Image (cartoon, helix red, strand yellow):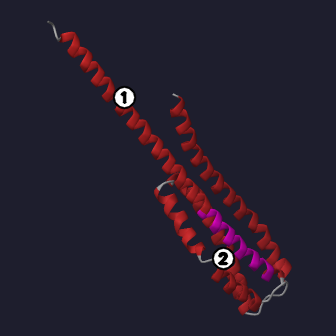
Amino acid sequence: MDLTPILISIATIALSGVVSALVTYKLNLRKDQDIFMRQKAEELYRSFDLYSHDLGMYFFHYFLLLKGLVDYNQHLDEEIKRGKEAKNTKNALSEVELLTGIYFPALDEHLKNYFAVRTELHNFLRLHKEAYKADSITDTKTEWSDPFSKRLPRLEAAEEVFKKSIVAEAQKYRLATKTRALS
């Protein structure tokens, strides 16, 4: 009795089982990686949204000061109050920098642009504070609030670009998972 056909059949079955297991493992691993990266993108978006919202409130309160609607004492009281309420903001910024640096380095330029606009606004406010301390503010509207309000849309635009970039990154992983599942 020739065992060759039986051995070939057994080997074929075993080999196809091994190949099937490897393919399934690889597909599941890739799917898990895609899910993980989507979750990281969602974390990044939420953290950035929290940080940018708090920064927007910070600049809004300064805008009230620049408009002359509150004085520096009222402004500082509000900042202290906001600081107590916004404890997560510092963590949110660290989270944004961490997630961008480790998982989404392609977004780094958009984040740097956002930070550059933020720095420009902070520098403007520093100049205002120096002028206030020197008692050299004459016309708050034309000198300070109008120029400040003209700079704010750049921050909003940089925020929007960064958020859209995060969504685009997340979409890559959603689409990659769907495409692999269909093929």
**Which badge, 1 or 2, is on the more N-terminal residue?**
1
The residue that label 1 is drawn on is 20
Q: Residue furthest front?
A: 1
Mark 1, mark 2: which one is toward the viewer?
1
**Residue extent of the magenta highlight:** 47-65
Kindly identify the residue that appears in the image at 57 percent across and 39 percent down: 175
Write down the residue under mark 2.
123
Q: For residue 56: magenta?
A: yes
Query: Splitting the image into 4 quarters, where does residue 174 fall?
Result: top right
Q: Position of residue 13 (x, y in %)?
A: 30, 21
The answer to whether 3 is drawn above or below residue 14 in the figure is above
Image location of residue 6, percent across then percent down:
22, 13
Q: Quadrant of residue 171?
A: top right
Q: How many marks?
A: 2
Quadrant housing residue 67? bottom right
The amino acid on which the numbered mark 2 sits, given as a three-letter code, is: Asn
Nearer to me, 137 or 18: 18
